[in-house]
Image (cartoon, grey):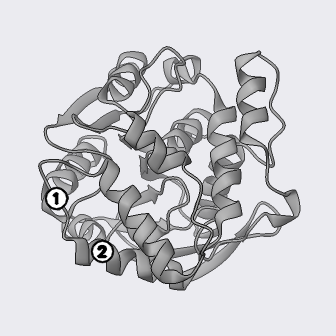
Amino acid sequence: PMHVTVSGNLRLEYESFGSEASPVILLIMGLGAHMQRWNVEICEGLVARGYRVIRFDNRDAGLSSKCDAAGVPSLGEVMSAMREGRSANVPYTLADMADDTSGLLDALGVDVAHVVGISMGGAIAQILAARHPQRVRSLSLLMTSSGNPALPGPTPEAAASLFAPLPRDRGRERIVADGMQRYFAVASPAYPSDPHWVRAMLEAEYNRCFHPPGVARQLAAIIASGDRRPLLASLRVPTLVLHGAEDPLIPAACGEDIAKHVPGAVLDLVEGMGHDLPLALTDRLVGAIAEHAGLAA
Protein backbone atom coordinates (compact mmCIF):
# COMPACT_ATOMS: atom_id res chain seq x y z
CA PRO A 1 0.00 0.00 0.00
CA MET A 2 1.00 3.61 -0.65
CA HIS A 3 -0.39 6.96 0.36
CA VAL A 4 -1.20 10.35 -1.12
CA THR A 5 -2.08 13.70 0.40
CA VAL A 6 -5.45 15.28 -0.40
CA SER A 7 -7.59 18.21 0.80
CA GLY A 8 -4.58 20.14 2.06
CA ASN A 9 -3.03 17.77 4.57
CA LEU A 10 -5.07 14.57 4.74
CA ARG A 11 -3.09 11.39 4.10
CA LEU A 12 -5.07 8.65 2.37
CA GLU A 13 -3.66 5.13 2.35
CA TYR A 14 -4.47 3.24 -0.85
CA GLU A 15 -3.60 0.14 -2.82
CA SER A 16 -3.76 -0.46 -6.57
CA PHE A 17 -4.21 -3.80 -8.35
CA GLY A 18 -3.79 -4.53 -12.04
CA SER A 19 -2.36 -2.58 -14.96
CA GLU A 20 -2.28 1.21 -14.89
CA ALA A 21 -3.40 1.08 -18.54
CA SER A 22 -6.75 -0.53 -17.63
CA PRO A 23 -9.96 1.36 -16.85
CA VAL A 24 -10.19 2.11 -13.13
CA ILE A 25 -12.67 0.72 -10.61
CA LEU A 26 -12.51 2.71 -7.38
CA LEU A 27 -13.81 0.92 -4.27
CA ILE A 28 -15.16 3.08 -1.40
CA MET A 29 -15.43 1.36 1.97
CA GLY A 30 -18.09 1.62 4.68
CA LEU A 31 -18.22 2.81 8.28
CA GLY A 32 -15.05 2.40 10.31
CA ALA A 33 -13.78 -0.39 8.07
CA HIS A 34 -10.32 -0.87 6.58
CA MET A 35 -9.88 -1.10 2.82
CA GLN A 36 -9.06 -4.83 3.25
CA ARG A 37 -12.79 -5.50 3.75
CA TRP A 38 -12.77 -5.22 -0.04
CA ASN A 39 -11.07 -8.60 0.10
CA VAL A 40 -8.30 -9.49 -2.28
CA GLU A 41 -10.54 -12.04 -4.03
CA ILE A 42 -12.88 -9.25 -5.13
CA CYS A 43 -9.97 -7.04 -6.22
CA GLU A 44 -8.30 -9.83 -8.21
CA GLY A 45 -11.63 -10.93 -9.69
CA LEU A 46 -12.13 -7.44 -11.13
CA VAL A 47 -8.52 -7.32 -12.38
CA ALA A 48 -9.13 -10.63 -14.16
CA ARG A 49 -12.00 -8.93 -16.00
CA GLY A 50 -9.74 -6.19 -17.32
CA TYR A 51 -9.83 -3.45 -14.69
CA ARG A 52 -7.34 -1.61 -12.53
CA VAL A 53 -8.72 -1.68 -8.97
CA ILE A 54 -8.01 0.96 -6.32
CA ARG A 55 -9.06 0.49 -2.71
CA PHE A 56 -8.27 2.92 0.10
CA ASP A 57 -8.85 3.77 3.74
CA ASN A 58 -11.31 6.62 4.26
CA ARG A 59 -10.22 9.48 6.50
CA ASP A 60 -10.44 8.40 10.16
CA ALA A 61 -10.04 4.68 9.30
CA GLY A 62 -7.14 2.28 8.81
CA LEU A 63 -3.86 4.02 8.07
CA SER A 64 -5.38 7.22 6.66
CA SER A 65 -5.24 10.47 8.68
CA LYS A 66 -7.24 10.70 11.90
CA CYS A 67 -9.25 13.85 12.60
CA ASP A 68 -8.70 13.69 16.36
CA ALA A 69 -8.29 17.47 16.69
CA ALA A 70 -12.03 17.70 15.93
CA GLY A 71 -12.96 15.74 19.07
CA VAL A 72 -15.79 13.22 19.31
CA PRO A 73 -19.27 14.52 18.44
CA SER A 74 -22.38 13.71 20.44
CA LEU A 75 -24.39 11.43 18.16
CA GLY A 76 -27.53 12.22 20.20
CA GLU A 77 -27.12 15.92 19.46
CA VAL A 78 -26.54 15.26 15.76
CA MET A 79 -29.71 13.12 15.64
CA SER A 80 -31.81 15.77 17.43
CA ALA A 81 -30.57 18.48 15.08
CA MET A 82 -31.54 16.40 12.04
CA ARG A 83 -34.96 15.55 13.52
CA GLU A 84 -35.63 19.23 14.22
CA GLY A 85 -34.44 20.37 10.80
CA ARG A 86 -31.46 22.28 12.24
CA SER A 87 -28.02 21.97 10.70
CA ALA A 88 -25.94 19.46 12.64
CA ASN A 89 -22.54 20.44 13.97
CA VAL A 90 -20.17 17.67 12.82
CA PRO A 91 -16.38 17.47 12.38
CA TYR A 92 -16.83 16.78 8.64
CA THR A 93 -19.53 15.63 6.24
CA LEU A 94 -19.92 12.85 3.68
CA ALA A 95 -19.46 15.61 1.05
CA ASP A 96 -15.99 16.25 2.53
CA MET A 97 -15.31 12.51 2.21
CA ALA A 98 -16.53 12.59 -1.41
CA ASP A 99 -14.05 15.42 -2.03
CA ASP A 100 -11.31 13.26 -0.43
CA THR A 101 -12.19 10.60 -2.98
CA SER A 102 -11.97 12.95 -5.95
CA GLY A 103 -8.69 14.23 -4.45
CA LEU A 104 -7.38 10.66 -4.44
CA LEU A 105 -8.24 10.32 -8.15
CA ASP A 106 -6.47 13.68 -8.81
CA ALA A 107 -3.38 12.57 -6.93
CA LEU A 108 -3.26 9.32 -8.90
CA GLY A 109 -3.81 11.07 -12.24
CA VAL A 110 -7.09 9.21 -12.85
CA ASP A 111 -9.57 11.37 -14.79
CA VAL A 112 -12.55 9.05 -14.66
CA ALA A 113 -13.41 5.86 -12.75
CA HIS A 114 -16.13 3.28 -12.30
CA VAL A 115 -17.08 3.97 -8.68
CA VAL A 116 -18.24 1.22 -6.33
CA GLY A 117 -19.40 2.16 -2.83
CA ILE A 118 -20.55 -0.06 0.00
CA SER A 119 -22.84 1.08 2.85
CA MET A 120 -21.45 4.48 4.00
CA GLY A 121 -19.16 4.27 0.95
CA GLY A 122 -22.28 4.02 -1.22
CA ALA A 123 -23.59 7.30 0.22
CA ILE A 124 -20.18 8.90 -0.44
CA ALA A 125 -20.28 7.53 -4.01
CA GLN A 126 -23.72 9.11 -4.58
CA ILE A 127 -22.38 12.51 -3.50
CA LEU A 128 -19.19 12.07 -5.56
CA ALA A 129 -21.27 11.35 -8.68
CA ALA A 130 -23.48 14.39 -8.04
CA ARG A 131 -20.57 16.78 -7.36
CA HIS A 132 -18.14 15.42 -9.95
CA PRO A 133 -20.28 13.74 -12.63
CA GLN A 134 -17.48 13.94 -15.23
CA ARG A 135 -15.26 11.74 -13.01
CA VAL A 136 -17.75 8.90 -12.61
CA ARG A 137 -18.25 6.63 -15.61
CA SER A 138 -20.56 4.26 -13.74
CA LEU A 139 -21.85 3.82 -10.23
CA SER A 140 -22.36 0.55 -8.33
CA LEU A 141 -24.04 1.03 -4.96
CA LEU A 142 -23.86 -1.93 -2.58
CA MET A 143 -26.08 -2.27 0.51
CA THR A 144 -26.63 1.45 0.93
CA SER A 145 -29.50 3.95 1.24
CA SER A 146 -31.01 7.12 -0.17
CA GLY A 147 -31.22 8.61 3.33
CA ASN A 148 -35.01 8.88 2.97
CA PRO A 149 -36.20 9.17 6.61
CA ALA A 150 -39.39 7.18 5.87
CA LEU A 151 -37.42 3.99 5.08
CA PRO A 152 -37.40 1.03 7.48
CA GLY A 153 -34.52 0.89 9.94
CA PRO A 154 -32.31 -1.96 11.12
CA THR A 155 -33.56 -4.92 13.13
CA PRO A 156 -32.87 -4.51 16.87
CA GLU A 157 -29.95 -6.98 16.67
CA ALA A 158 -28.43 -5.19 13.70
CA ALA A 159 -28.88 -1.81 15.40
CA ALA A 160 -27.03 -3.17 18.44
CA SER A 161 -24.19 -4.33 16.19
CA LEU A 162 -23.83 -0.70 15.08
CA PHE A 163 -24.58 1.30 18.23
CA ALA A 164 -23.74 -0.95 21.20
CA PRO A 165 -20.86 0.51 23.25
CA LEU A 166 -17.46 -1.15 22.96
CA PRO A 167 -16.32 -3.38 25.81
CA ARG A 168 -14.34 -1.66 28.57
CA ASP A 169 -11.44 -4.00 27.93
CA ARG A 170 -9.87 -2.72 24.70
CA GLY A 171 -7.35 -5.56 24.36
CA ARG A 172 -7.22 -7.45 21.08
CA GLU A 173 -8.91 -10.67 22.28
CA ARG A 174 -11.90 -8.85 23.74
CA ILE A 175 -12.29 -6.43 20.82
CA VAL A 176 -12.04 -9.23 18.23
CA ALA A 177 -14.64 -11.33 20.10
CA ASP A 178 -16.94 -8.29 20.23
CA GLY A 179 -16.31 -7.61 16.54
CA MET A 180 -17.22 -11.20 15.63
CA GLN A 181 -20.55 -10.85 17.44
CA ARG A 182 -21.28 -7.65 15.51
CA TYR A 183 -20.17 -9.20 12.20
CA PHE A 184 -22.39 -12.26 12.51
CA ALA A 185 -25.38 -10.17 13.66
CA VAL A 186 -25.61 -8.69 10.14
CA ALA A 187 -23.98 -11.43 8.02
CA SER A 188 -25.55 -13.25 5.06
CA PRO A 189 -27.87 -16.03 6.27
CA ALA A 190 -27.49 -18.13 3.11
CA TYR A 191 -23.71 -17.61 2.78
CA PRO A 192 -22.18 -18.12 6.23
CA SER A 193 -18.56 -17.01 6.56
CA ASP A 194 -15.98 -19.23 8.25
CA PRO A 195 -15.50 -17.85 11.80
CA HIS A 196 -11.73 -18.45 11.47
CA TRP A 197 -11.67 -16.22 8.38
CA VAL A 198 -13.65 -13.49 10.14
CA ARG A 199 -11.44 -13.73 13.24
CA ALA A 200 -8.25 -13.45 11.17
CA MET A 201 -9.65 -10.39 9.35
CA LEU A 202 -10.63 -8.68 12.61
CA GLU A 203 -7.27 -9.48 14.23
CA ALA A 204 -5.45 -8.01 11.24
CA GLU A 205 -7.61 -4.87 11.45
CA TYR A 206 -6.93 -4.48 15.17
CA ASN A 207 -3.19 -4.88 14.62
CA ARG A 208 -3.22 -2.43 11.73
CA CYS A 209 -5.22 0.28 13.50
CA PHE A 210 -7.91 0.26 16.18
CA HIS A 211 -9.32 3.78 16.50
CA PRO A 212 -12.88 4.09 17.87
CA PRO A 213 -13.11 7.94 17.80
CA GLY A 214 -12.77 7.85 14.00
CA VAL A 215 -15.81 5.57 13.74
CA ALA A 216 -17.88 8.00 15.85
CA ARG A 217 -16.95 10.92 13.58
CA GLN A 218 -17.78 8.93 10.43
CA LEU A 219 -21.12 7.91 11.97
CA ALA A 220 -21.88 11.57 12.74
CA ALA A 221 -21.21 12.38 9.07
CA ILE A 222 -23.63 9.63 7.97
CA ILE A 223 -26.41 10.83 10.30
CA ALA A 224 -25.89 14.47 9.23
CA SER A 225 -26.10 13.56 5.53
CA GLY A 226 -29.89 13.51 5.60
CA ASP A 227 -32.16 12.78 2.65
CA ARG A 228 -30.27 12.34 -0.64
CA ARG A 229 -33.30 11.80 -2.90
CA PRO A 230 -33.06 15.25 -4.57
CA LEU A 231 -29.39 14.58 -5.31
CA LEU A 232 -30.19 11.11 -6.69
CA ALA A 233 -32.76 12.59 -9.08
CA SER A 234 -29.99 14.76 -10.57
CA LEU A 235 -27.69 11.83 -11.40
CA ARG A 236 -27.10 10.97 -15.06
CA VAL A 237 -24.59 8.21 -14.43
CA PRO A 238 -25.31 4.54 -15.26
CA THR A 239 -26.20 3.17 -11.82
CA LEU A 240 -26.41 -0.38 -10.47
CA VAL A 241 -27.97 -0.94 -7.04
CA LEU A 242 -26.70 -4.24 -5.58
CA HIS A 243 -28.39 -5.16 -2.32
CA GLY A 244 -28.75 -8.19 -0.09
CA ALA A 245 -32.39 -9.27 0.09
CA GLU A 246 -31.78 -10.27 3.73
CA ASP A 247 -29.79 -7.20 4.86
CA PRO A 248 -30.82 -6.60 8.51
CA LEU A 249 -28.84 -3.35 8.91
CA ILE A 250 -29.82 -1.45 5.74
CA PRO A 251 -32.98 -3.24 4.60
CA ALA A 252 -33.53 -4.02 0.91
CA ALA A 253 -36.20 -1.27 0.80
CA CYS A 254 -33.31 1.23 1.09
CA GLY A 255 -31.69 -0.05 -2.10
CA GLU A 256 -35.08 -0.14 -3.82
CA ASP A 257 -35.57 3.52 -2.90
CA ILE A 258 -32.24 4.48 -4.50
CA ALA A 259 -33.18 2.63 -7.70
CA LYS A 260 -36.52 4.44 -7.73
CA HIS A 261 -34.88 7.88 -7.57
CA VAL A 262 -31.83 7.53 -9.85
CA PRO A 263 -32.95 7.85 -13.49
CA GLY A 264 -32.40 4.54 -15.31
CA ALA A 265 -30.92 2.72 -12.31
CA VAL A 266 -30.85 -1.09 -12.35
CA LEU A 267 -31.74 -2.98 -9.16
CA ASP A 268 -30.06 -6.33 -8.45
CA LEU A 269 -31.31 -7.97 -5.24
CA VAL A 270 -29.13 -10.86 -4.07
CA GLU A 271 -31.18 -13.57 -2.36
CA GLY A 272 -29.79 -14.81 0.95
CA MET A 273 -27.27 -11.96 1.26
CA GLY A 274 -27.00 -9.73 4.34
CA HIS A 275 -24.67 -6.84 5.19
CA ASP A 276 -21.29 -8.42 4.45
CA LEU A 277 -19.09 -9.63 1.58
CA PRO A 278 -18.91 -13.40 1.99
CA LEU A 279 -16.26 -15.18 -0.10
CA ALA A 280 -19.03 -17.44 -1.46
CA LEU A 281 -20.55 -14.41 -3.22
CA THR A 282 -17.30 -13.11 -4.76
CA ASP A 283 -18.07 -14.32 -8.29
CA ARG A 284 -21.68 -13.11 -8.13
CA LEU A 285 -20.69 -9.61 -6.99
CA VAL A 286 -17.61 -9.31 -9.24
CA GLY A 287 -19.70 -10.44 -12.22
CA ALA A 288 -22.44 -7.88 -11.55
CA ILE A 289 -19.98 -4.99 -11.00
CA ALA A 290 -17.79 -5.84 -14.01
CA GLU A 291 -20.76 -6.33 -16.32
CA HIS A 292 -22.26 -2.99 -15.27
CA ALA A 293 -18.92 -1.20 -15.76
CA GLY A 294 -18.53 -2.89 -19.15
CA LEU A 295 -21.90 -1.61 -20.36
CA ALA A 296 -20.90 1.94 -19.38
CA ALA A 297 -17.43 1.79 -20.91
Q: Quadrant of residue 68?
A: bottom right
Task: Tell me residue 99's x, y (percent).
Answer: 68, 50
Task: Tell me residue 242's x, y (percent).
Answer: 28, 39
Q: With respect to residue 115, does 256 lie above or below? A: above
Task: Tell me residue 176's x, y (percent).
Answer: 44, 74
- Residue 192, disc: 1
- Residue 40, disc: 2
User: Which residue appears farthest toward the right when viewing the image?
Assistant: 69
Which amino acid lies under the numbered mark 2 shown in the image of this protein? Answer: Val
Tell me what residue is drawn at x 79 percent, y 47 percent. 73
- Disc 1 to disc 2, how far (Cα)? 18 Å
Going by the image, does 49 lie left or right of 168? left
- Residue 152, disc: none
**Which comes before the other along the chain, label 1 or label 2?**
2
In this rendering, does residue 19 appear at all?
Answer: no
Please tell me how many numbered marks the rendered image carries.
2
Dot 1 lies on which element? loop
Q: With respect to residue 171, does 237 lie above or below? A: above
